[in-house]
């Protein structure tokens, strides 16, 4: 009997990060629930023990139910029966197991039946489930919708809908995209009109590319204000499928994540309830929802990468050529080593980002109960800013690395990997979507460049730089300091030109340069806690240094004339 939590010591390493003391104290409000709920933890150690026990359950279900079902789910996929999505047999079995284990609504407050877990173990569970089946992770992971209701809905809305997730195991969906409004969500034309006689909002229009579109509970972005064309006219609504006012027009036939139904939906006078305030749908609520989804894609990318890497290592040990296992050939073991280092780097970036999110969200909920102290407010704002700039960087880099790792896993398998005889073929197809949905890599750059323009990344890099490192790590720190100086010089040179087009052209290079430095420091911080990570830090930083130097050279050599040449495409 395998277990995808206990067989991966790196998960427990990140779960025991020093910041977890603060995160748990904030989330548990100094353990005030212990007298009201018999399953509430008594102290920090009790909380960590609860996290580990639940993650072991998630690891067991993932290894022994979800992963064995992945191949049949990929082949069978969902269907439409009587205007309802019918999951593949394996998907139903997977969800039932997680529901019985109480893993729906993990982060919700206990008064609504949740476990009140912090973001870290929830993200860790998402990584574990994604390793087993990335497509199924989408269905399970859309419980993020419940967290949005908890964060922004009225108490009445929370009491009505949150128990549906925790007690009934409700599924969720984000109904955002339309045929003519994909990345440009402020162009949404889907209508919400208020019926005064019935005292209800009615939704009308078409939504497209909706993951798990026939969910029990859907969050729907709609234009509630007449004669508006921008984001200020959009509001967020919650729709319950029991109203049966939605027609499933089609299921998309996808390259990968085939067990996850992607729907085109037609709403016709569908009754719904407003979440929060009017006009704040996109500006506040959906941006928060999307950031949560992007953190989830980060976890999905790491989980897929873990699965791809393990398949590649296993095959490289088993496959012999020229009288020895192929893992003994430099061309192969270098490839595997780089896959492993990239996996370590994005996992560290994932949990660093999740820690920022954890702290700021806890302070947000505390601020609903009482006024924050000046130091608390400062910490709240700082972690919120860091979460806002780290999340798009995480989504960009983790999804791109995920695609690279899955690509190399196929390469290690050779011709066999191109066939459907091994799981790596499915893993490779599943990986491809990570850099596309919930905002393409190109859109993540648009969001992440703010961290360059405002100095947000540089400030955090300085914070890492000021930490104390072991003497044997100083030579790596010096490399990172040199990389930082070069990054600062390149960034300053571009910003001084005040040329928006040139900045946009180099934006991805600048964000990736910052990411290389940040991941280098994160691996260095990991090496302070465990010597095993020094090897990963050394290889990553040396390669990152070379990668940044290449980018800097190209930035120096590229001017407006080059942009003119590059734009000459047909």
Image: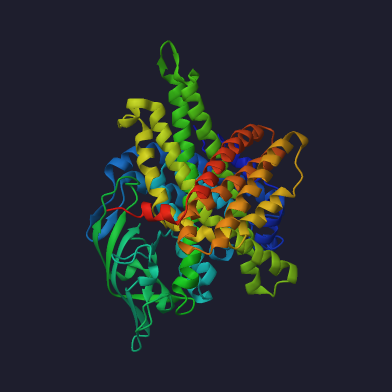
Residue beneath the point at 44% across and 57% down:
560
Residue beneath the point at 52% across and 71% down:
152
Say whether residue 490 is left or right of residue 249: right
Q: Position of residue 17 (x, y in %)?
A: 67, 46
Residue beneath the point at 26% across and 50% down:
253
Q: In front here: 30 or 546?
A: 546
- Above or below residue 488? Residue 361 is below
Q: Position of residue 247 (x, y in %)?
A: 25, 66
Which color scheme does this rendered protein use? rainbow
- Above or below residue 415? Residue 398 is below
Residue 447 can be seen in this image: yes
- Above or below residue 553? Residue 473 is above
Q: Position of residue 132 (x, y in %)?
A: 44, 40
Q: Position of residue 557 (x, y in %)?
A: 50, 48
Q: How many marks?
A: 0
What residue occupies the far bottom of the structure in this picture?
197
Say whether residue 215 is left or right of residue 557: left
């Amino acid at each position: 009997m395998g277990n995808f939590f206990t067989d991966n010591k790196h998960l427990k390493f990140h779960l025991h990060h020093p910041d977890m003391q603060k995160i748990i104290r904030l989330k548990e409000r100094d353990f005030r629930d212990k007298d009201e709920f018999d399953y509430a933890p008594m102290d920090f150690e009790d909380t960590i023990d609860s996290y580990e026990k639940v993650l072991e359950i998630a690891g067991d279900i993932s290894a022994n139910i979800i992963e064995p079902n992945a191949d049949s789910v990929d082949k069978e996929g969902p269907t439409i029966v009587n205007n309802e999505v019918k999951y593949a047999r394996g998907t139903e079995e997977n969800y039932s197991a997680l529901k019985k284990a109480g893993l729906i609504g993990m982060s919700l407050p206990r008064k609504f039946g949740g476990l009140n877990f912090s973001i870290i173990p929830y993200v860790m569970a998402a990584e574990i489930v994604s390793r087993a089946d990335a497509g199924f992770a989408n269905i399970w992971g859309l419980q993020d919708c419940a967290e949005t209701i908890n964060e922004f809905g009225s108490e009445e809305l929370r009491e009505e809908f949150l128990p549906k997730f925790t007690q009934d195991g409700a599924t969720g969906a984000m109904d955002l995209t339309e045929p003519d409004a994909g990345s440009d969500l402020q162009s949404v034309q889907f209508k919400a009109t208020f019926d005064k006689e019935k005292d209800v909002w009615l939704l009308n229009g078409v939504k497209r590319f909706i993951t798990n579109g026939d969910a029990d509970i859907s969050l729907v972005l709609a234009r509630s204000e007449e004669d508006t064309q921008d984001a200020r006219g959009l509001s967020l609504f919650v729709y319950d499928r029991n109203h049966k006012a939605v027609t499933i027009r089609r299921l998309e036939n996808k390259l990968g994540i085939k067990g996850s139904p992607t729907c085109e939906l037609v709403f016709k006078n569908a009754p719904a309830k407003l979440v929060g305030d009017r006009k704040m749908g996109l500006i506040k609520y959906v941006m928060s929802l999307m950031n949560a989804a992007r953190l989830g894609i980060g976890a999905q990318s790491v989980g897929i990468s873990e699965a791809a890497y393990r398949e590649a290592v296993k095959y490289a040990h088993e496959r012999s050529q020229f009288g020895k296992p192929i893992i003994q050939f430099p061309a192969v073991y270098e490839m595997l080593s780089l896959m492993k280092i990239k996996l370590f780097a994005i996992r560290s970036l994932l949990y660093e980002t999740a820690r920022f999110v954890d702290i700021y969200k806890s302070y947000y909920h505390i601020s609903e109960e009482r006024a924050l102290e000046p130091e608390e407010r400062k910490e709240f704002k700082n972690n919120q800013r860091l979460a806002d700039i780290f999340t798009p960087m995480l989504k960009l880099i983790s999804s791109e690395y995920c695609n690279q790792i899955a690509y190399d896993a196929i390469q290690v398998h050779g011709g066999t990997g191109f066939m459907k005889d091994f799981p790596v073929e499915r893993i490779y197809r599943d990986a491809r979507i990570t850099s596309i949905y919930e905002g393409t890599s190109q859109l993540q750059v648009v969001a992440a460049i703010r961290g360059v323009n405002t100095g947000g990344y540089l400030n955090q890099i300085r914070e890492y730089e000021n930490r104390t490192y072991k003497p044997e790590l100083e030579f790596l720190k010096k490399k990172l300091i040199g990389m930082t100086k070069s990054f600062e010089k390149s960034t300053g040179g571009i910003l001084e030109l005040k040329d928006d087009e040139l900045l946009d052209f180099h934006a991805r290079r600048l964000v990736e340069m910052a990411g290389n430095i940040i991941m280098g420091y994160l691996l260095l911080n990991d090496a302070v806690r465990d010597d095993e990570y020094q090897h990963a830090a050394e290889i990553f930083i040396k390669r990152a240094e070379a990668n940044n130097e290449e980018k800097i050279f190209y930035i120096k050599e590229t001017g407006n004339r080059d942009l003119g040449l590059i734009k000459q495409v047909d």
